Amino acid sequence: SAHFLPMREDDSMDKLTKLYLKEVVTRHGIPISIISDRDPRFASNIWRAFQKALGTRLDMSTVYHLEIDG
């Protein structure tokens, strides 16, 4: 399932972590893996260490590239 949580660009990692625990972990348990965009907050060492401690694998989505026919 997918979760889209409203956040502001200037929200702290502490706020992100609390929101994640409240909205995702308490409802579904600790995820086996997370697929995320490459937002700096989700690619940060703090977020990676947090997910590693929980045992969650992080997968970053790839940047979309248009194919050029030709």
Image (cartoon, rainbow, N blue to C red):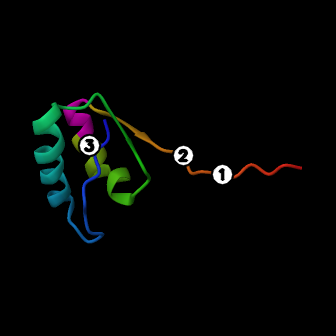
- The location of residue 23, given as percent across then percent down, is 15, 46
Which mark lies nearer to you, 1 or 3? 1
Q: Which mark is residue 49?
A: 3
Q: Amino acid at mark 3?
A: Ala
Hey, which quadrant is residue 24 in on the image?
A: top left
Residue pointed to by mark 2: 62
Q: First in sequence, mark 2 or 3: give its number.
A: 3
Other-residue count near label 3 (Cα within 10 Å), few / some / many at <14 / 14–19 / ≥20: few
Residue pointed to by mark 1: 65
Give the residue at x 10% y 46%.
22
The residues colored magenta run 51-55
- The location of residue 36, given as percent across then percent down, is 39, 46
Give the SS element for disc 2. Answer: loop
Instruction: Judge by depth and name the residue closer to the eye, 47 or 69.
Output: 69
Q: Amino acid at mark 2?
A: Thr
The reply, left or right, for residue 24 in relation to residue 1 is left
Majority SS type along the magenta span: helix
Give the residue at x 70% y 52%.
66
Cα–Cα gap, marks 1 and 2: 9 Å
Q: Determine whether 15 is above or below 55 in the image.
A: below
Q: Are marks 1 and 2 in contact (CB under 8 Å)?
A: no
- The location of residue 21, given as percent across then percent down, is 13, 44
Q: Amino acid at mark 1?
A: His
Cα–Cα gap, marks 1 and 3: 29 Å
